[in-house]
Amino acid sequence: MTGHHTLRQTEDAIGERLGGLNVDFEAMWAVSNIYRASSAIRNHLEQTVLRDTGLTWTGFVVMWVVWLWGESETRHVAAEAGISKSTLTGVLKTLESYRHIRRFPHPTDRRRVMLELTASGERLMRSLFPDFNRQEAFVVKELDSEQRRGLADSLRKVVQHLETIER
Amino acid sequence: MTGHHTLRQTEDAIGERLGGLNVDFEAMWAVSNIYRASSAIRNHLEQTVLRDTGLTWTGFVVMWVVWLWGESETRHVAAEAGISKSTLTGVLKTLESYRHIRRFPHPTDRRRVMLELTASGERLMRSLFPDFNRQEAFVVKELDSEQRRGLADSLRKVVQHLETIER
DNA sequence: GAGCGCTTGTTCGGGACCAAATATTTCGAC
DNA sequence: GTCGAAATATTTGGTCCCGAACAAGCGCTC
């Protein structure tokens, strides 16, 4: 949320709006930068790798999960992709219309639905992943190896901490 | 994208899917963890602070920007909030219907539209922000002060690097 | 001062997104 | 075996989200 403003300007503005309430700026900067970075990265990858593929970000993530782990149950895929089951239903409708992914029934439990990539989906992922990974490398180009690992580790801690709540 | 799998399992699965292409795992983990953390945090804040306020995440972010910087032009707010102008138009329609925000014309340029919080919007932000910041602190609870700053700094570098492209 | 690029916000169409309600199936208690 | 509770995916309704097309205003040139 900084834009062209400096950190100090932002902190001063918040201080003014709050009239002396104490603010945890360290936490605020960490959290808000995660959000900003995530948006920026998603935009960048949509503009580069996904441009002209007809895939949305979420569509790609869903296919990535299925590609990586092979045929899977929908609720597992939804959790891995970080979307709700109802969203997945809609996304699958789109991906199925492209013939990239296929639904089929669970062998024993008729409530469940399984997913697998079609041959065209498989081909697409195999051709897309190297580009994707190249752009991921571009994104963290300004960080050295230690910073990249530290970043991933810190974020992993955050995610794990939030997972312990687990309503 | 790890879920309950270990890092090693995931790396092995990717290696298998790619048959020996070399993968920048450091970049991959850094980027994918930013995405995972961002989703987890957004979900958490929606479930805690925003629950029962009637505000969505994006609605809150838009109000936050206007609250922080005072009356502003829409294109500035859209950029700060990380959404497109057309999205902002829709979000504003919602926020205006709640009487939390108000549009008014730019004093000299009749193309532009200015925004300001209403009294009720102002009240809402003042009451929400302490909760919000408390939850931000909770999110990074497992990181020490140095890690929080390092995290914010690394992410800031990523964002700034991506901003240099600027189509 | 008419015309023409440029900037700005909105509209439109299609997809993503979620919670709540729904329908189907499973599984345990009895 | 039957009932009811739990688990599962889908539908529904409302919002978010974007790019492209659009409409309106600005400012420059001539």
Image (cartoon, coloured by chain):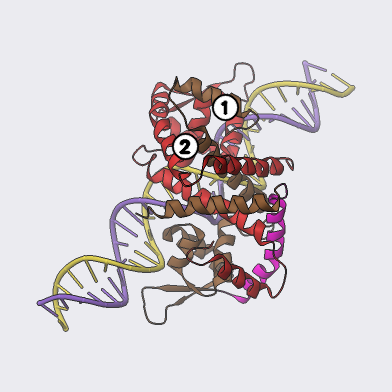
Chain colours: A red, B brown, C yellow, D purple
Residue named by callout 1:
B10
Q: Foreground residue, B69 or A102? A: B69
What count of labels does the image hold? 2
Residue at 59% in and 20% down:
A106
Q: Is residue B167 left or right of residue A86?
A: left
Q: Relative to B130, does residue A109 appear above or below in the rendering?
A: above
Q: Is residue B144 visible?
A: yes
Magenta-span inclusion, residue B138: yes
Residue B167 position in % (x across, y down): 34, 54
Residue named by callout 2:
A59
The magenta segment is B117-142
Residue at 54% in and 69% down:
B66
Residue at 72% in and 52% down:
B138
Mark in the foreground, 2 or 1: 1
Q: Relative to A126, does residue A46 appear above or below in the rendering?
A: below
Residue type highlighted by circle 1: Thr
Q: Is residue A123 left or right of residue A7?
A: left
* Magenta stretch: helix, strand or loop mostly: helix
Residue at 74% in and 40% down:
A164
Instruction: Give the numbered dot on residue B49.
Output: none
Residue type highlighted by circle 2: Gly
Residue A20 position in % (x across, y down): 71, 74
Q: CA distance from mark 2 to mark 1?
A: 20 Å
Chain containing mark 1: B
